[in-house]
Image (cartoon, rainbow, N blue to C red):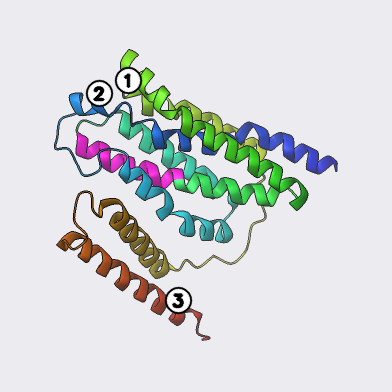
Amino acid sequence: MVLRARTSRRWRPSRWSPCFSALDQTVVSTALPHILATCPGQRCWGGCSRPYFVGCPATVAVVGKLTDLFRRRAVFLVSVGLFSIASLLCGVAGSLPQLVAFRGLQGVGAGAIQTCSLIVMSDMFPPRERARWQVINSIGFATASAVGPSVGGFLADNFSWRWIFLLNVPLCIATVAALVYGLSRGSRTGARPAIDWSGVVWSTVMVVAVLLVCTWGCREFGWTSFEILGLIALAVVAGWLLVRAERVRGRPR
């Protein structure tokens, strides 16, 4: 009981970790006119939000497996660090294509953070308490998504749209400190974990292709256009290669 109480208190400082990743999903929507007015370059497909939404779910399966192979805290810290670096790059981007690319990288870090937070909660709390903390996490996620447009509009109108991303850096530093304090290192395994790189590549390609089809279909391109049909074919081929790679890997040697 004492250990469980200490664990709960330690987790509280870091429970906002998925909140700023949720905030960045909607914070750019109201600041987009300011970004397009001050950031030179072509108006890339989907503006600055869609690369983020594509990057978030593309990393869920990969990060979930990495947390099984490596320590939870290490993967969590790398995820927060990636999100922080991507936020800094977004804040200093000199053109719209750069901003779009860095937003995709930020989405990868955000998806990893959200995945790690759920995995860590399942490890730290027993089933009886797990649902309560998942609800708290979901409330924070929903609240951050709801206030995102207001925060983005306020910062863009009164300061600069760059502060939308730069403010994530100190929040990430505070989150890293909370994770270092609140999460244990875990046990060290003697054997070096083997990563299924082919599965990582093909699963990511398949998920990204499917998301792009759902995002661009009947908006930027027609359903029968070359781009959409090419993405569908890419998703099918990547799915077939993924199944083939996993079957080969699962055979006894």
Badge nearest the viewer, 1 or 3: 1
What x and y, as percent, mark residue 203?
Answer: 39, 65
Residue shown at 64%/44% (left/top)? 134
Badge nearest the viewer, 3 or 2: 2
Lateral position of residue 34 relative to residue 241, left or right:
left
Residue shown at 27%/29% (left/top)? 32
What residue does disc 2 label? 34
What x and y, as percent, mark residue 206?
Answer: 35, 64
What x and y, as percent, mark residue 46?
Answer: 25, 43
**Vertically, is 60 above or below 233?**
above
Image quarter of the N terminus: top right
Discs 1, 3 touching: Cβ within 8 Å: no
Asked which secondary structure carries label 2, the reply is helix
Label at residue 156: 1
Query: How far is the residue under mark 1 from the one under mark 2?
Result: 7 Å
Query: How far is the residue under mark 1 from the one under mark 3?
Result: 47 Å
What residue does disc 3 label? 246
Discs 1, 2 touching: Cβ within 8 Å: yes
Q: Residues within 10 Å of mark 3 (few under 14, many from 20)?
A: few
- Mark closer to the chain start, 1 or 3: 1
What x and y, as percent, mark residue 72?
Answer: 59, 51
Residue at the extreme right of the image, as rendered: 1
Q: Amino acid at mark 1?
A: Ala
- Mark closer to the chain start, 1 or 2: 2
**Vertically, is 93 above or below 249?**
above
Q: Main secondary structure of the magenta part?
A: helix
Residue 56 appears in the rendering: yes
Asked which secondary structure carries label 3, the reply is helix
Residue 177: say if magenta: no
Lateral position of residue 211 relative to residue 138, left or right:
left
What segment carries the magenta color?
Answer: 96-110
